[in-house]
Image (spheres, rainbow, N blue to C red):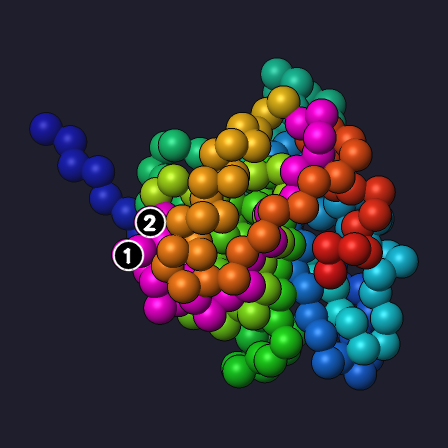
Amino acid sequence: MSEARTITVPRTARYHVLGGEETSESWFALHGYGQLAGAFLEPFRALASARRRIVVPEALSRFYLRRGTGEIGASWMTREARADEIADLLRYLDLVAEQELGPDPAGLNALGFSQGAAAAARWAVLGATDVERCVLVGCAFPPDLEPARHAERVARVRWSFALGREDTSVDAASVERDVERLRGAGATAELVRFEGGHELPSTLASLL
């Protein structure tokens, strides 16, 4: 007989920081599946300033994108040991927020793309850090997060969904239902459509 056991271990994580020498507003930008933080941060460079800090964490699980060689990407979670991976990402983002912004940060927001949007939503609802606004690009609300069950926490966040008009990977009708479910739980929620597919919008500044 074998018994599966777990242990929590320290590990080294990587994140990038843009701007923020006189921070009054902070954004955590979470990349999508198979991406790395260093490339994902490029569209955000023009949005960083002395008063706006942008933090781009890299997901903890890196892998080769093509059969064990070549380009490398990272993933926030898989279905294997999913609860543990979600707990790890929540702890990771909380630690980065504390290190960069102190133990009680104000004006903290999150923007995630695709799988990173699901991670951002989970952090906003389940993390130890207060997130004021959460922007989900190319992603529906995680189905395992029931807004009514987390109504108090959900209602503290301003939710924005952004979908490309040509994005075939996300069902717009499902996102519209998510907006109504969040509103039903007392939250402010909106859906914004932009020209493009499954990608960050060219008018990224309009989402911040």
Cα gap from disc 1 to disc 2, whole angstroms: 5 Å
**Residue 35 spot, x, y in % from top left:** 68, 37
* Residue 64 x %, y %: 64, 27
Quarter of the picture containing the N terminus is top left
Please name the residue shown 34% across and 43% down the image: 144
Query: What amino acid does circle 2 point to?
Result: Glu
User: Residue 69, how many percent across, how many down?
Assistant: 68, 21
Secondary structure under tag 2 reads loop
Whether residue 176 appears in this view of the structure is yes
Q: Is label 1 in a helix, a strand or a loop?
A: loop
Q: Is-magenta flag for residue 206?
A: no
- Side of 159 where 195 appears, left or right: right
Q: What are the residue bounds of the magenta stretch?
A: 145-167
Q: Is residue 117 above or below residue 111?
A: above
Three-letter amino acid code at disc 1?
Answer: Arg
User: For this view, does 88 lie left or right of residue 133?
Assistant: left
**Crowd around label 1: few <14 · some 14–19 · many ≥20 (10 Å):** few
Q: Mark 1 = which residue?
A: 149
**Vertical arrangement, residue 99 with respect to residue 3, above or below:** below
The residue that disc 2 covers is 146
Residue 147 part of the magenta segment: yes
Do the residues under discs 1 and 2 have CB atoms within 8 angstroms?
yes
- Residue at image point 50% right, 53% down: 121
Q: Quadrant of residue 153?
A: bottom left
Residue 136: mark in rendering: none
